[in-house]
Amino acid sequence: MIVSSAWRGKCSVNYEEGLDRAAKYLAYQPRTRRQLVDHLRGRGVSADDADRIADLMESYHLLDDMEYTKMYIESRLDMGRGMNRIRQELRQAGIDGSMIEDALFVMEDLPDEYETARMQAREAVRGENVGAMDHAARQKLMARIARRLAGRGFSTDTVYRAVRAALDEAARDREED
C-alpha cells in the first residue's frame, strides 16, 4: 500500500525508528542539533523523542554544534563568503551568536575579510579600462561590484573600501602600461 508523504509526516514514529532516521541523516553530512530535531519532527518523531535522540547523538559525538560551526565557517570562507552571510546562515541552522563568536575566537589563521573582498573586487575589475571611464561609468561599475560583494556577505564598510581599492589599483595598473 502506498502512503502519501503528507500522511506519513503526521504519523507517530517510535524512538527506535527515530534513532535510525537520525543516524541516516547524520551520516549524509554534519548537522546542527536544531537541524536534526527539525528533521525528526518533520518525520513524525515526537518532540521529547527528538530531543532524547539529539542528546544521545551528542553523547556519542555524532552531533556537535561547535565543530559544525567551525567547519562551516572554514568552508564558507574558502568559498570567498563574508562573515555577515556566514553568521546569518549559521543562525538559520540554529547556532546562536555566542557560539559563532566562540568558534571564531578559537579558530586560527582566518583570512582577512577585507583582503578577500578586495581580491574579489579586483577580479571583477579585470579587463575594465577604469582610467578611461567617465564618472558615471565608474559609479555604475562600483555599484555592480558592490552588489556582488554585499551578496556574498561582506559588510558595507568592507565592500566600499575593497571596491575603491580595486578600482584605484586597476587605474594605476593601466597608467603604468
Image (cartoon, rainbow, N blue to C red):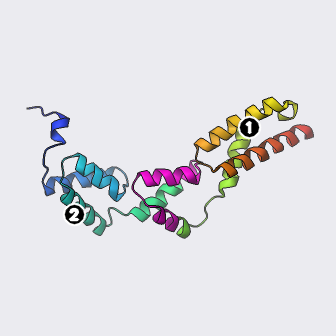
On the picture, is 17 further left or further right than 68?
left
Give the residue number, with chain letter if any, for mark 1.
142
Q: In the rendering, at what x and y percent does residue 39 appear?
A: 28, 49
Q: In the rendering, at what x and y percent does residue 161 appear?
A: 74, 49
On the picture, is 102 further left or further right than 29?
right
What kind of residue is marked 1? Met
Is residue 7 visible from the viewing direction of this image?
A: yes
The quarter of the picture where the C terminus appears is top right
Secondary structure state at the residue bearing disc 1: helix
Q: Quadrant of residue 124?
A: top right
Q: Vertical placement of 158 versus 48: above or below?
A: above
Q: In the rendering, at what x and y percent does residue 95 appear?
A: 42, 59
Give the residue number, with chain letter if any, for mark 2.
52
What kind of residue is marked 2? Arg
Q: Vertical placement of 14 versus 170: above or below?
A: below
Q: Main secondary structure of the magenta part?
A: helix
How crowded is the residue under tag 1: few (<14 C-alpha within 10 Å), some, or many (20+)? many
Pointers 2 and 1 in contact (C-beta within 8 Å): no
Q: Vertical placement of 55 versus 115: above or below?
A: below
As for residue 176 lying within the magenta part, the answer is: no
As for residue 92 lying within the magenta part, the answer is: yes
Q: Which residues are magenta?
A: 75-103
Q: Vertical placement of 30 versus 101: above or below?
A: above
Is residue 177 visible from the viewing direction of this image?
A: no
The quarter of the picture where the N terminus appears is top left
Outermost residue, left direction? 1
Secondary structure state at the residue bearing disc 2: helix
Q: Which of the marked residues, 2 or 1, is nearer the chain's N terminus?
A: 2
Q: Report the number of numbered marks.
A: 2
Q: Quadrant of residue 15?
A: bottom left
On the picture, is 81 further left or further right than 124?
left
Residue found at x 18% / y 52%? 45
